[in-house]
Image: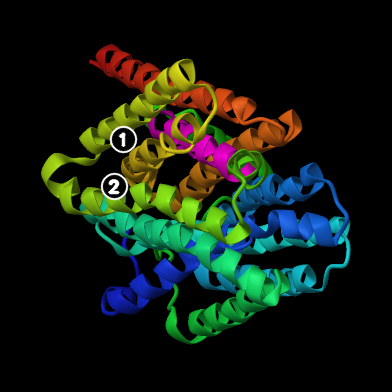
Amino acid sequence: MSAPDDVRSIPLMVGLLVLMLTILGELSTQLYVPALSLIAGEMSASPVAVQSSLWLFLFAFGVGQLVFGPASDRLGRRPVLLSGLGLYVAATVGCLLAESVTVLIIARVLQALGACVGFVMARAIIRDVYPLPRVPAVLATTTLAIALSVAIAPTIGGWVSMQWGWRMIFAALAVLGVLLALLVAVGLPETRPKNGTGVERTESLLRAYREVAMHPVFLRHALPLGLVYGAMMAYVVGAPFAVRNMLGVSTETLGLIFGGILSGFVIALVLSRLLVRRVGPQRLLTAGLALVCLFALTTAVGYALRGLDAYSVVLPQFLLTLGAGFVFPNAVAGAIAPHGSRAGMAAALVGCLQMLLGALCGLLVSAAGTSSTAPMLLIQLIVVIAAVAANRLFSARRAALADAVL
């Protein structure tokens, strides 16, 4: 499969757009996380109701990719991308004008459906444009962009909320959505492979999704990715209330704590980008899962020795984000690598699984309440253990299938 010739002549333009599209979904969440308690107070809403705007966003973000991915394989990347960005801008304006938590939640769901198009199209375009050996390095770069935005956004969001109110966050996001739509319209050529036609019938679509989803290589990479992301989202949902109450800090300070923890994500992504060609994506993935295991061990030991405090609850999260920085780009590359003609579909499916597992962990943390960090930690420990187990299980299954063929 080859992309159109004019695409390969402007990799810088494509690369810049991919980076911007990739961070849209994370910015839409991380900027307003520190302001959740302010929103709850202004709208006289419960913490659980406001938290639902987070995990429902993730749920819609994941499900929407199942539509946009195969649609782009069939119709092309550009029209699908422009449609999604249009929906994003309209929904973000809805968030800006919301006067009740119900309206805010509905607008957030629609915003997620629009934002997910940038996420899945970015991954598909990377698979379209770059040679397969370069895909892990390029994905590491885009994931680094996500990490930088995630590390910086909570601090900015907390500061903006205290200075001008949380609605200003959505005003800025609406402007960003308009600018991205304009850049795509004037600067992005069609990248879908010339001989890619997608899937025509619903039955064929479901069968194709099943074939991708049941592929051992896909499962070996996509499940650990989604589960590690779920562990991170458990903290994102729980920290604005439970951790803030435990530490007794301000909204701005909470944003700084988020940024400090997520710096591990940035560090690991930089190292992954530098080492992937020398070490290989599989070894880096294994290293990331080892760090995730160390997070679980450190958290358990810290809780046994100190109980629930900043040292046992907050500091070990750095190890989780450090491990995630190695896991994310290499897991995505491994999951979509065998599916060149279905790059949009594979990217959509891995993204959907990632977001659904993140939403599930967020829902569980929200349902457990905000009075203690213990449920959040328990959920994190369970899912990181499951991530390592899934990687080992499907590695063994792949080896068994290879032996059967031979």
- Looking at numbered disc 2 in the image, what kind of residue is underneath it? Ala
Q: Nearer the viewer, residue 16 or 258?
A: 258
Q: Nearer the viewer, residue 356 or 77?
A: 356
Q: Residue at x 25, y 54 (%)?
A: 270
| Residue 296, magenta (yes or no) | no
* Percent position of residue 73, x then y: 51, 58
Number of marks in picture: 2
The residues bearing labels 2 and 1 have C-alpha atoms spaced at a distance of: 9 Å
* Percent position of residue 284, x then y: 24, 38
For the record, the magenta segment spans 218-237
Q: Residue at x 32, y 65 (%)?
A: 129
Secondary element at image label 1: helix
Q: Tell whether label 1 touches label 2 (CB within 8 Å).
A: yes
Q: Is residue 109 left or right of residue 204?
A: right
Q: Nearer the viewer, residue 46 or 66?
A: 46
Q: Which residue is mark 1?
A: 288
The circle drawn on residue 350 is none
- Looking at numbered disc 1 in the image, what kind of residue is underneath it? Gly
Q: Where, by quadrant of the figure, is residue 317 drawn?
A: top left
Give the crowd class for mark 2: few <14, some 14-19, many >=20 residues within 10 Å: many
Q: Residue at x 35, y 45 (%)?
A: 325
Judge whether 279 appears above or below 386 on screen.
below
Give the crowd class for mark 1: few <14, some 14-19, many >=20 residues within 10 Å: many
Q: Tell me if I can see residue 198 in this picture.
A: yes
Q: Which residue is mark 2?
A: 268
Q: Where, by quadrant of the figure, is residue 6 drawn?
A: bottom left
* Percent position of residue 365, x then y: 67, 33
For the N terminus, give its image quadrant: bottom left
Judge whether 67 appears above or below 403 on screen.
below
Q: Is residue 372 left or right of residue 319?
A: right
Give the prevailing secondary structure in the magenta stretch.
helix
Residue furthest toward the left? 278
